[in-house]
Image (spheres, rainbow, N blue to C red):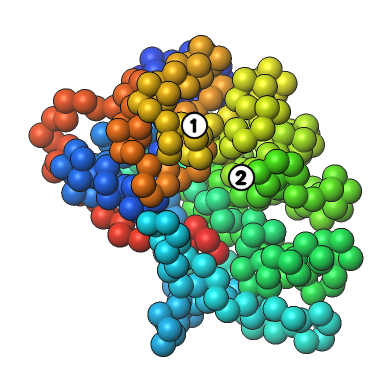
Amino acid sequence: MTSRERVLSCCERKGFDRIPIKHEGTPEVNQQIKKYFGLKNDEQMFTVLGDDFRYVEPGYIGPELKTFPDGSVEGYFGEHYIYKEFDGGKYLESVYQPFKGVLELQDLDRSHFPTADWFDYSTIRAQAEGIRERGLAVCAGSAGDLDFINGISRARGMEQVLIDLFDDNEVFLEIMRARFEFYYTMHERILQAADGGIDFMHVGEDLGNQLTQMISFDIFDRHFAPKYGAYFDMVHSYGVRTMMHMCGTVWSFLPRLIELGLDVYDVVQPTTPENDIAALAENFGDKLIFQGSMDVQKEIAFGTVEDVEREVKRRLDLFPRGGLILGPSHAIQAKSPIENAVALYKTAGSLMENIPSWVFQIEGVNEAGINMSKLF
């Protein structure tokens, strides 16, 4: 099977030669993996790990995103990001929020709103065809697209956003409208440019925290459901599956998201019994495809190789004919033993253990930092 055949058969629960794989690691972890195998770039790493997916993206041609004296970089909505170190790893964090403290619509500066016209879609079809020719599944978008709670909080503040959701603040609703229009239009233009070459469209929304849901069902139906329903319908109209990144415990939202048209739940964070992959398989396994689920907070970070092998085998038993795309429950974090990451893919059967010489000739980007487009 090619990777794309494997992934599509998994989604249709028709069986496969091995379980499909989708890798994610922090830049520090990816560098360690490349060093472990003697690889030069991310494309070589994805090949060796057996990642079955690749992404297309439009080129940015909009206004210059400024770099400021403190080293921070401007985001699409005018927020500023800077690298901050957390226990051995670096993440881009928002350090300037242009909509912070804005409570009246008349005070909202809409000049910070981006447009889908800031991107060049002319190479999308060629990108998709190139990925398909290599036998891989094609994705577009990212976990940071739509992403109303996290995305708007980076330009407004998380506390204010959670208050906004309760009191229907008109400033928040206008920013939400603009963010939806921006990503909806961008994604539709990607789909149009690809001309049938996309398999999955990727968005995100962290509806859960470690233990439970972040917002009420009433708030979800009032503010989120209409937009996600419209977005999922648009994606399906192009014959493409929807993939939604959700950190935290979100099982309680799954019935509603299924009704709205969600196909793939990415990345499955198994922090409560209800969100364990076995419980999700029992309750939603005939309606959803799951992606991820290997715990980056437990087995991968602090367990042994044997712990990782046991958890992979448990998933192989739960999904013998499909329904799960295996991978970590988020980016594998810095300081996690590389042996555990290797064990994940080796036990899944995707790891290229005896690397042929042609792999070392693959050209690609050696990503030294986080792709900022995933945050905006």
Badge 2: few (under 14), some or many (20 or more) residues near its Cα, within 10 Å? Answer: many
Q: Earlier in the sequence, mark 2 or mark 1?
A: 2
Quarter-of-image position of residue 285? top right
267 sits to left or right of 284: left
Q: Is residue 83 left or right of residue 211?
A: left
* Image spot of residue 205 (x, y percent): 65, 50
Give the Cα distance between marks 2 and 1: 13 Å
> At which x and y percent is residue 294?
49, 31
Dot 1 surroundings within 10 Å: few (below 14), some, or many (20 or more)?
many
Q: Quadrant of the N terminus?
A: top left
The vertical placement of 368 against 18, above or below, is below
Counting the numbered discs, the total is 2
Residue 159 percent across, percent down from the top left: 74, 66
Q: Quadrant of residue 85?
A: bottom left
Check whether the beta carbons of the residues at disc 2 and disc 1 lie within 8 A of each other. Answer: no
The amino acid type, in three-letter code, at marker 2 is Cys
> Which residue is disc 1 drawn over?
294
Front-most of residues 371 and 197: 371
Side (left or right) of 130 relative to 165: left
| Residue beneath the point at 61% across and 45% down | 247
For the residue labelled by badge 1, is the local secondary structure a helix, a strand or a loop? strand
Residue under label 2: 247
Closer-to-camera residue (130/313): 313
Q: Residue furthest left?
A: 357
Q: Position of residue 241 (x, y in %)?
A: 59, 36
Q: Is residue 2 visible?
A: no
Pick whichever, 38 or 350, lies toward us: 38
Q: Judge whether 147 appears above or below 259 on screen.
A: below
